[in-house]
Amino acid sequence: AQSVTQLGSHVSVSEGALVLLRCNYSSSVPPYLFWYVQYPNQGLQLLLKYTTGATLVKGINGFEAEFKKSETSFHLTKPSAHMSDAAEYFCAVSDGRDDKIIFGKGTRLHILP
Amino acid sequence: DTGVSQNPRHKITKRGQNVTFRCDPISEHNRLYWYRQTLGQGPEFLTYFQNEAQLEKSRLLSDRFSAERPKGSFSTLEIQRTEQGDSAMYLCASSLGGGQIDTQYFGPGTRLTVL
């Protein structure tokens, strides 16, 4: 069975500071990994995904994530936070059989002025 | 490409009533998914369709829930005899299907409140 653990239900960073959202996964097969963002009253939007190949994945809005198999992690980072980054972020995993995605509980990112 | 649309956006109903939600996927997307999201949780998979065929149902989908996708286009999710525990955001997503982990595009969701 697959699962995702997101460390910290709320994270606050100052505008311009590094954003780091942590995600650890569990999977019995090579995983496909995702980060989605959800703005208030909007649907989920894909930030980035890892399938195979390069372990550092670049996404939209300046976000990137690195797949570390030895640590079973897929942490999301952004060098400099903007106020517009305030949202809820979900890490997710799939085994690739049918696109079914298992989501974490989410981390709400707060940006402090 | 107008994105995935869901109707209604909000639904308030009394316990015991039936409700039906509609999802219109991105045109030419073969796969359609339903998820449920409760407060403080991530989306949980309910069911998905490949064209008109319903291929998998989660154990979360009790007998009171039924989903259809006639003609492989839009889909409906019906909940019969609603309970307060059904209150949640119901999300629909679609993907091209057939590829390796095609990106799922999500709609804005239907928020259900059962009184």
Image (cartoon, helix red, strand yellow):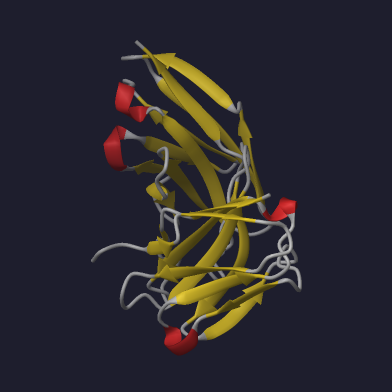
Residue A99 in view (yes/no): no
Q: Quadrant of the N terminus of chain A?
A: bottom right
Position in image of residue B98 (x %, y %)? 43, 77
Q: Nearer the viewer, residue A33 or A83?
A: A83
Q: How many marks?
A: 0
What residue occupies the far left of the structure in this picture?
Answer: B1
Could you say which quadrant of the image residue A31 lies in? bottom right
Position in image of residue A14 (x %, y %)? 39, 12
Position in image of residue B67 (x %, y %)? 59, 76
Q: Is B77 drawn above or below residue A77 in the view shown?
A: below
Residue A53 in view (yes/no): yes
Image point (32%, 22%), residue name: A83
Image point (23%, 66%), residue name: B1
Q: Nearer the viewer, residue A102 or A96?
A: A102
Q: Nearer the viewer, residue A78 or B70?
A: B70
Image point (55%, 71%), residue name: A98
Q: Is B67 drawn above or below residue A99 in the view shown?
A: below
Could you say which quadrant of the image residue A84 lies in? top left
Position in image of residue B8 (x %, y %)? 45, 60
Image point (51%, 29%), residue name: A108
Q: Is A86 drawn above or below residue A5 in the view shown?
A: above
What residue occupies the far front of the structure in this picture?
Answer: B14
